[in-house]
Image: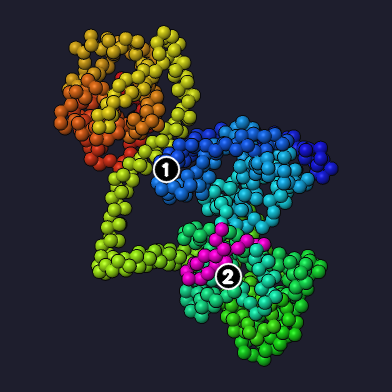
Amino acid sequence: MRKTFDKLIKLDKPFTDIGRRLLDIYLASALAPVSLAASSLAAMTIIANGKFELFEEGRRIGLDGKPFSQLRLKPPIAPHKFKRLCEVLKRVHAYDAPLIFNVLKGEMAFVGPEALRLNETEELGEYELLRFSVRPGLTDTYKLRKRMNIAFESRSVMERSYIARRSVKKDLAILARTIPTLILGHQAPVYADSFILRDVKIDNLTMREVIDRLMKLAEQGARHVAFVNAHCFNVSSDDEEYRSILKKTDLTLPDGFGIKLAGIMIGAEVRENVNGTDLFPRLCMAASRNGKSIFLLGAAPGVAEKVRDNMIGRYPGLSIVGTEHGYFENDSAEEKALIERINIQQPDFLLVAMGVPRQEKWIDAHLQDLSVGVSMGVGGLFDFYSGRIPRAPVWMRELGLEWTWRLAQEPRRMFRRYIIGNPRFMLDVWRWYYGQARTQLINRFNDIDLPLNLYREEMEFQIRRMLWWIATDGSLKFKRFIDITASSMGLLVLSPLLITTAAAIKIEDPSGPVFYGQERVGMHGRMFRMYKFRSMVKDADRLRAQLMEQNESKAGVLFKMKNDPRITRVGKFIRKYSIDELPQIYNVLKGDMSIVGPRPHLVSEMEQYGVKERDRLEVTPGLTCLWQVGGRSLLDFNQQINLDRRYIQNQSLWGDMKLILKTIPVVLSGSGAY
């Protein structure tokens, strides 16, 4: 495959590709714990929805046409449990987390063309085989722009551009831009051709579909096309005439990142950000190919003429039949002469750049008087294509930050529009959407003819029910999620220390085991096997009976000796810094224990419990607790029980976080441990 394309482009970049591979290894190694934690959480949602076939393994074609197995988790279809969590995990691609291990193996890279199936490669043209000169990747420029709805060029064009210009620096830049798009973007197909936003129908089309639709509308004549962004909706809130015009346009197109965020809020994914600035050059190209003409109206004197000259220079066959500035009075002789001039030329497309809402009102007032195919308001488009105002760099558009560029260029004019207007728009969308939901709830009860006061009672009941779930079952599930995530990452991060400790134990006493398992009492009296690093001699349990008379625990339930002769030299060190307890992270992962909770006791110790002491069996035992940070072995049994009961009565996620933070310095200092 390489030899076929050597004539087209110099493919070999040995030093660049070595640097990119080193970057992949470093990042994959660093992200492996996060990947494992994300995979564990995603797997939990699959099992919770009754699916036990976790992985889907697909054959893909990689570097130099070599096949490899790509490993992914199989997301639940129409989940009935953890529905919202499943949606979030899909959005951030948590079900794709195992692909990190394909990167570690060298079968994929972080940045590169998408890995294709064998049947997909058979449909590629010869010029597209260039993609096999590099490893397939988890992301690339096309995927990044696809998530942010601005992938107007074809995949093959963008892949060839990346391959020709690939470098470590470019990969880092793409990865940095990918992180926010994982949260804000969406890559799944969107099939809705339209959606309703604040009672305005938005046509949800791709750029190519819009161009095709415009060509057809131009044949029909007297059609009105509008672009809507956050500012347009804010203006329409204060202008009833403008709002009514937006509701009756022939085509209303989503423009800007604000509409994308609003779509996410109401569950309507925008297919592409079809803004006028990106549409204009594509409209000019299509018009030149189809023999369509354009008239430019608006902006300051001389601006439209510069746009005409620039676009004709770019598209030689383009027909721009007239230009005119937008500084004229309504119902004046100048306006009537302008309309007559436009009608003489009979353009297929009239682009009106007068700003919102004047341009839409002018088009609506004169639509039937104009001999024009399609009239559309384009705002400040002429300023960009005349060269008067530069447009934001591509990387800012990929992150949805073009508005910050406009704000920096014209802060006084744009401050109110963006800094005040954007939050106002999102708040209005939220009020509208949840107002709709409330109306639907009331309508549902209208069908069964309940008295009005029962509507309120039903809604209050549902709210109380949700709050109760959060305070009880919801908090326990979230705590379990934290346990799974923290224990998965902990086992990976601490693996060097675990291996070193195991080796030290084996070197000191080769005949004994590394780990020590002991039956402990868990939640509701359930027995489980708790694991520790062995810190004592082999016959420690048998020798304990002989040492009971020397027990230093005041209450007599626990067995504690400051200078226990059964403890080995390695054991003394690992007990002081609680390293011997680290294997219990595995118990946390299994669900026998939690990160925070009362320490689990032996069966013999539990048998001596009174009624008060049995309260501690109502929660899952943990690695750390209040008495672990408040004295450890220096406290007697009754003091430990009192602290455990205090924790049970006042437990909260915030309290758990504070306990974890307090545990770290206590463990590192070794105070109170023996």
Q: Mark 2 belongs to which amino acid?
A: Thr
Q: Residues within 10 Å of mark 1 (few under 14, many from 20)?
A: some
Task: Tell me which label, 2 or 1, sits earlier in the chain.
Answer: 1
Residue at left offset 40%, top offset 31%: 589
Residue at left offset 37%, top offset 38%: 480
Q: Residues within 10 Å of mark 2 (few under 14, many from 20)?
A: many
Residue at left offset 72%, top offset 69%: 386
Query: Horizontal and vertical percent for residue 596?
Result: 33, 34
Residue at left offset 30%, top offset 21%: 519
Q: Looking at the picture, does residue 293 appear above or below residue 272?
A: below
Q: Looking at the picture, does residue 638 appear above or below residue 391?
A: above
Q: Is 343 on the left or on the right of 51, as rendered? A: right
- Label 1, on which residue? 49
Q: Which residues are magenta?
A: 191-208
- Label 2, on which residue? 252
192 within the magenta span:
yes
Q: Alpha carbon of mark 2 to alpha carbon of mark 1: how far?
A: 40 Å
